[in-house]
Amino acid sequence: MLLERYTHPEMGKLWQDGYEYDRWLEVELAVAEVMAKRGEIPQKAMEDIRTKAKVNSERILEIEAIVRHDLIAFLQAVVEEIGKSGKYLHLGLTSSDVKDTALSLVLKDSGLLLKKDLIEFREALVKRALESKYTVMVGRTHGIHAEPLTFGLKLALWIAEIDRQIERLDQAIVSVSAGKISGAVGTYANVSPEVEEAVCQHLGLETALVSNQILQRDRHAHFVTTLALIGGSIEKISTEIRNLQRTDILEVEEPFADGQKGSSAMPHKRNPIICEQVSGMSRLLRGNAVAAMENIALWHERDMTHSSVERIILPDSCILLDHMLRQMTKVISGLKIREDHMKRNLQKTFGLTSSQRVLLALVEHGCMREEAYAWVQQNAFEAWDQGLDFIEVVSKDARVLTYLTKEEIQGLFDLRYHLQHVDNIFKRLKLED
């Protein structure tokens, strides 16, 4: 399991040491109950199993040290608790019937917790998007000033992506919420399909339509790659915040707590450490996704190459993403939005962000596009290279003045023009003030 510092109680409880034992017992008891109802296990024996079966983790580990098989050790320890009636436990099953079905229960619960995290993160984004709906800032393409937009629109873009990630997570939860009780190679030779269906229904899982000894690992790869995709979106957002927090931009700052210190050497430092942390963690998620995809191809009806991998990547991926989402929710909720710096940065390019408006106005008034482009580009480069206001340079160009009046040119630099469809975009996302 990951370092304790990244493990939050809700998710940690699902993957704590020995977590599998309780879930294995849950599956074994579900199978026994179904078989008892079908008359395949005596009712008296079922009463013993129901009342006496319990997990003794220490005893399981003692036995496993000898038999070197975790599920056999688990069964032996539970049967010791039950007594003679324990012989009816695990009838017709193979280890993976229990282990894979139990693992699906854990992954389903983990997925639902991650969905809760995602929704809370989305809510934080929505709140800040509405607050900064009309907070004007410069857009950047290739790292260079482009045209104005609002910080609220930047957040709206992230909200739409998180909505897609919620849909993907829903699909991944469905995919991994499957059980199988079909025996050693999936033929139901010693346990009936009806038992499987009843057990899965009782556990709240879908029944795998066909299986061999295990549930197929494309399900688990779907789940882990989905977590990696979500991590990619988190990294995208954190990278943007890190860039916007750079000293030479400084348009936003992640929260900095009272008493927090940014550097052992430089007291002035306020570093975006949370965003850096989650950016790094996203790399681990992507690595785990590759491992999950490698687990899909197994020998014949099953080998065990996937097992050791999953002991690491499944808990680690769930714990990682849970931590990342919780941390980024804090960042967005406490994000310091520097409107003053946004305005200052917008003015650094002397009005060049309106170059396209001048170009289009010239074309609309009859100028050929290539000619208009050349004039505007010449004026833009002159303004930039000499540190002049672009509007003044354009207003002195006789070629431009043959098509546009100075009043018309002045109107082309009104920033409100760029905000005219902000409401429409927010309505598409069903974001309300």
Image (cartoon, rainbow, N blue to C red):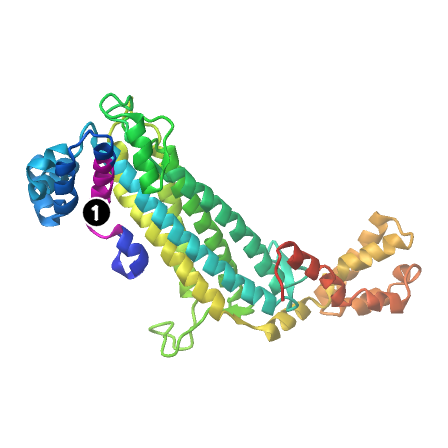
Q: Quadrant of residue 7?
A: bottom left
Residue 183 lies, with reference to residue 199, above or below; the image says above
Q: Which quadrant, please, contains the C terminus? A: bottom right
Across and down, in percent, residue 78 comes to: 12, 42
Name the foreground residue: 68 vs 393.
68
Magenta stretch in the rendered image: 15-33
Q: Quadrant of residue 343?
A: bottom right
The amino acid beneath tag 1 is: Asp
Residue 281 in sight from this viewpoint? no
Residue 394 lies, with reference to residue 87, above or below; the image says below
Name the foreground residue: 306 vs 389.
306
Across and down, in percent, residue 330 comes to: 43, 66
Residue 304 lies, with reference to residue 427, above or below; the image says above
Residue 282 in sight from this viewpoint? yes
Residue drawn at x 40%, y 53% is 114
Across and down, in percent, residue 179 comes to: 32, 35
Residue 380 lies, with reference to residue 21, above or below; the image says below
Position of 201 with respect to 344 (left or right) is: left
Magenta span dominant secondary structure: helix
Helix, strand or loop under label 1: helix
Q: Is residue 19 magenta?
A: yes
Q: Is residue 280 magenta?
A: no
Name the foreground residue: 241 vs 315.
315
Residue drawn at x 47%, y 70% is 334
For disc 1, the marked residue is 22
Marks counted in the figure total 1
Name the foreground residue: 229 vs 200.
200
